[in-house]
Image (cartoon, helix red, strand yellow):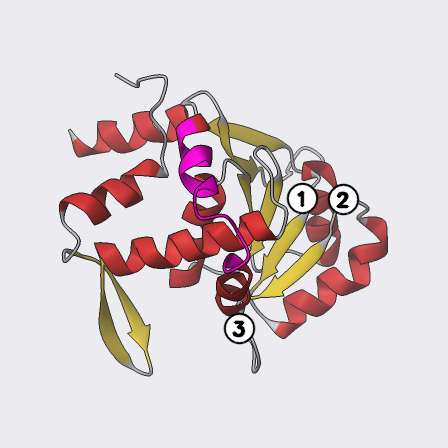
Amino acid sequence: TIDEHDNVASIVFSHERDDPGHVIFQRLTDGSWTDVTCAEAAAQIRSAALGLIAEGVQAGDRVAILSATRYEWVILDYAILSVGAVTVPIYETSSAEQVRWVLEDSGSMLVFTETEAHAQMVKELHDELPALRKVLRLESSGVTALDALAEAAATADPAELPRRLAALRSSDPATLIYTSGTTGRPKGCQLTHSNLLHETRGAAV
């Protein structure tokens, strides 16, 4: 049973409250696996979420992630969902035309790119994407996306995040998954928080 107020993002902060020291992730850092506790992950997600708020991301806005699966992907996904925005995943192997179409069709206002090549691709497409306001890099020799969001978070009202979480409904959109486009251009399939919760709770039974 999915309640009207249930959402995917709140579980992050429930874990932080109920079992802060539990190791919920392991990430490869400089060749070694490093434990990440519920409290540590929630702190990063909270920081990134407040950074998104500081960047002007509103509930319902689309935020794209052009990257392979990695630890930062998960942190950003939960941060996006926490502020009521919608995650738009883009395969890291997508062509420039595929990236352009997904960003244009979704109306994404911010995109996270993994590599310099991804960032350069989006930069060259920028003039064709009127909704796109900013591009942030996951990998960088300077300030990474999570660093930039943490810095921006200092200017956000900390009380805004709990307000955003309280406003979430299970019927709200969580993500737009684009099809492979075998019968034409890829089409965005909207999945709600309720859709994702039914799947995860069903898998846990």
Query: Would you name the residue on which mark 1 appears?
Result: 108
- Tell me the quadrant of the picture where the N terminus can be found: top left
Q: Position of residue 36 (x, y in %)?
A: 24, 64
- Name above or below for residue 127 compared with residue 147: above
- Tell me the quadrant of the picture where the C terminus can be found: top left
Secondary structure under tag 3 reads loop
Looking at the rendered structure, the kind of residue marked 3 is Glu
Looking at the rendered structure, the kind of residue marked 1 is Ser
Residue 186 visible in this rendered orientation of the protein: yes
The residue drawn where x is 56% and y is 75% is: 143
Q: Position of residue 155 (x, y in %)?
A: 55, 57
Query: Would you name the residue on which mark 3 appears?
Result: 139
Q: Which residues are magenta?
A: 153-166
- Name above or below for residue 4 compared with residue 205: above
The mark nearer the N terminus, 1 or 2, is 1
The stretch drawn in magenta includes residue 69 = no
The numbered disc on residue 131 is: 2
The stretch drawn in magenta includes residue 158 = yes
Looking at the rendered structure, the kind of residue marked 2 is Ala
Secondary structure under tag 2 reads loop
Q: What's the CA distance linking mark 2 and mark 3? A: 24 Å
